[in-house]
Amino acid sequence: MSTRTGFPRTVARTFVQRFIRALIQVQIHGEIHAFIQGACMRPSVTAFEVHDIRFPTSERLDGSDAMNPDPDYSAAYVVLRTEDGHEGHGFVFTIGRGNEVTAAAIEALRPYVVGRPVPVGAADLAALHHDLTHDSQLRWLGPEKGVIHMAAGAVVNAAWDLAATIAGLPVWEFLAAMTPEELVSLVDFRYLTDVLTRQEALAILRAAEPGRAERARLLRAEGYPAYTTSPGWLGYDDDKLVRLAKEAVADGFAQIKLKVGADLDDDVRRLGLARAAVGPGIRIAVDANQRWDVPDAIRWMAALAPYQPHWIEEPTSPDDILGHAAVRAGQPVKVATGEHAANRVVFKQLLQAGAVDFVQIDAARVAGVNENLAILLLAAKYGVPVCPHAGGVGLCELVQHLAMFDFVAVSASREDRVIEYVDHLHEHFVTPAVVEAGRYRAPTAPGFSARMHPASIAAHRYPDGPLWRARRPAQEVAS
Amino acid sequence: MSTRTGFPRTVARTFVQRFIRALIQVQIHGEIHAFIQGACMRPSVTAFEVHDIRFPTSERLDGSDAMNPDPDYSAAYVVLRTEDGHEGHGFVFTIGRGNEVTAAAIEALRPYVVGRPVPVGAADLAALHHDLTHDSQLRWLGPEKGVIHMAAGAVVNAAWDLAATIAGLPVWEFLAAMTPEELVSLVDFRYLTDVLTRQEALAILRAAEPGRAERARLLRAEGYPAYTTSPGWLGYDDDKLVRLAKEAVADGFAQIKLKVGADLDDDVRRLGLARAAVGPGIRIAVDANQRWDVPDAIRWMAALAPYQPHWIEEPTSPDDILGHAAVRAGQPVKVATGEHAANRVVFKQLLQAGAVDFVQIDAARVAGVNENLAILLLAAKYGVPVCPHAGGVGLCELVQHLAMFDFVAVSASREDRVIEYVDHLHEHFVTPAVVEAGRYRAPTAPGFSARMHPASIAAHRYPDGPLWRARRPAQEVAS
């Protein structure tokens, strides 16, 4: 059949139907189209480079503790590059073997990043964090813990480095320039709302809005208190311990930290020596690196308590929320933990259970800045001070930004707060953390202070970098 | 200088010194020498093959739930081969993307296995489990959670498959033939002793010694109760749900399970349809697959309670011990969880906190048989029934052995206990699990029932197997 014009009726009907459908689509998808148009005007992430970088630190017993006798400080390192020439750097810190597994996990996230418009603000960084932690198939590998979660953290942190660099601000100032609404939009509240809702988080951030500028000024003028772990590695002999403890005090540190947990008699002697070396006015924290069962921790800390340790760190399994609560209740020394807490759900419970006196965030174990923001908010709700874990390679560089942002815009306090400092491997970073007179200086360079020198990356690539090629025969033997 | 015989004095002295030193060494290291001699007479593990195997199950929505809408059931699969021709098979179950990361983690464990004397008994299997979970550098990637821990589980389970095969027994009988002393030697009690000491575990196992033979006879005669999840996948329509629920009852199942958590109205309708289809005498468990926050879980289950669900499974984050306790206290339906609990420390706390009515072990998420033995002992101490999680690919095959061993030698009970069954992918296994009239038949073939047909492995290798090569263009697009 045909219409009068000789045009087949079915064709005419199809044409009208298509026209109407197209009109509806334009209406419905208007927002999406506008978004795509906006995105298309932005450059994209075009490269995603993953490096397995390892430092042979085990050769000198730097970093030795009761659980980690011979770490080779390592980084599964990712570089994002944009088509307009910007870079974002991030990494997972590990201690050697298995760094290639973490690198493979970062690699698995490539499809979420390459081709994506360059993230520039809170909305982009929230979306990226969501995509990286909510892939339903990859999630099975955690969920939200271990290798796949740390990998997401590396990529999220690289995106923050990129966005802050483009904004021309160090990450702590980039975060502190965001509104409370933008900040809560960055947080995944799933599994938190029995303890912290979006509204409560917003109230915490709004309460800290007055005074942001003044606290930022204070940071630029005075920095943020640091403590040093450099004297206290378990592999160091008594003379080195005493010498380094005295040097730390002379350098202006008001707190040092000793590793404990391998042998009680040794620990009593070492803590006694350190206390004698630094005097009663210096805080000495002790760190068991998960060595004990709950009854051991209580017995051990009762023996060390006379030397007034400031806190006992990681007395037992990082998964043992009820265990930490029992240790806290069972002996007089305050409890700190968190560097190995897998995610915000574990931190939530540590706070709910009254298990910790200090929350020790780590910049590279949870899913990056976004999840650490959730943890800062949880700690603020409970009024528990955040004292970040650092050391390893690059952790001081990253975490200083989070602590300073916490002071400016979340807890609004530096009281009882202190960032760990270890004087290792900073020379490999383009803008290393600077600690003077026992305080972190506020970073001024744009970004997350996360970038290693290209020559350091090239030299320490495993197993093909020159440093490791030279060592290969010894390293190939399984330990 | 020379002695009178013309023999240089220093040479003579050196000779005597060496002789004395050797005597002392023989004395000190007698045990080690005996061990090495024993070991040298045993064949070694000579090959360690790792395969990335994936099934395109997402194409049919089998296995779809509120958190996992499109799983591609996968296995990071390991085969150990000995110089005398034996094999041990093990695997990590995943749901697709990232299976290559888990395969890389298994690969990282190779140095602990290749060249090792073939494990044949409790002492060897204890030592292997210890070595795989205590590498101080690899431990950083967990600790004891996520990809690296699941990888250790795959290798441990492969070693059990190997040892039981050599012994000519199915794993459940191989375990049930061990003494209480041998069984506790397999367990890593670190982080458990505040709740379960070696002595307490020994007492539990000794109390269950009488009657082992009779219970094994009962298993061979009657099997072990199963329930089926096959009717309840979220991707199935109402008609399919009702039809499959009726079929399940006709097939002899006394319990079925439905996936819930995506939409409350849908869940009320689906649960109502299922209850009408099966009648009041059949248990219907529901499974939220971690979809909810605590307040959501309580609200949702209050709405579903009128249909008498048997349990609510995984109402919230698997890390949220206190959250599960709150859900259990806040609504009338019993709580089950565990398939995603990372390790024995999490199970310990779920029991301590009174958070669960049913403990759902998974055969391939924790560090293999050894850690699951710890979990069975913890559950027995608290008198909480163990109802294993299964499904996926190969999980039914593995976990039946653990439940049956639990009945013979640990809890000594089948009351309120049931093993999940899903009728997918069994055709790929050499000795698949057999469920008849709603009961698992006791396996009789030596080993862990873990072996896939070589043709299935070859066909499903990712990305190079023929099945995936044919699909490549579609799969390369990031979802």
Image (cartoon, coloured by chain):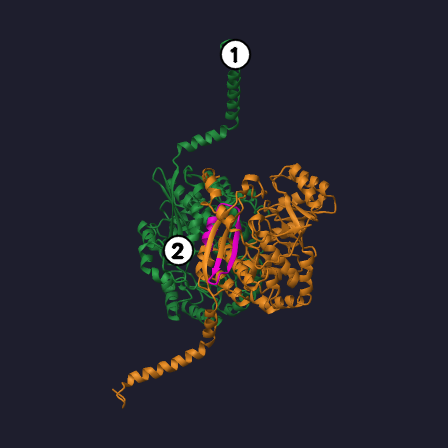
Chain colours: A orange, B green
**Between B308 and A322, the one nearer to me in the picture:** A322
Residue found at the very far right of the displayed protein? A280
**Which callout, 1 or 2, points at the residue further toward the start of the chain?**
1
**In this rendering, the label closer to the viewer, 1 or 2:** 1
Residue A105 sits inside the magenta stretch: yes
For label 2, the crowd category at 10 Å Cα-Cα, with few meaning under 14, some 14 to 19 and many 20 or more, is many
Residue labelled with disc 1: B2
A220 w.r.t. B407: above or below: below
Whole-percent x and y of residue A391? 59, 49
- Residue B374's place in the image compared with A210, above or below, is above
Residue A452 place in picture, x, y as percent:
53, 52
Against B439, residue A469 (above or below) is above
Amino acid type at image mark 1: Ser
Amino acid under disc 2:
Ser
From the viewer's perspective, is A222 left or right of B101?
right
Q: Position of residue B99 (x, y in %)?
A: 42, 54
Q: CA distance from mark 1 to mark 2?
A: 75 Å
Q: Is residue B434 magenta?
A: no
The boundaries of the magenta stretch are A80-106
Secondary structure at numbered mark 1: loop
Q: Which residue is mark 2?
A: B74
Q: The N terminus of chain A lies in which quarter of the figure?
A: bottom left
Do circles 1 and 2 both sit on a common chain?
yes
Instruction: Describe residue A137's horizontal placement relative to residue B203 as left or right.
Output: left
Is residue A392 or residue B379 the one in the foreground? A392
Q: Within 10 angstroms of label 1, few (less than 14), some, or many (20 or more) residues?
A: few
Instruction: Tell me the element at label 2.
Output: strand
Q: Nearer the viewer, residue A326 or B211?
A: A326
The chain ID associated with circle 1 is B
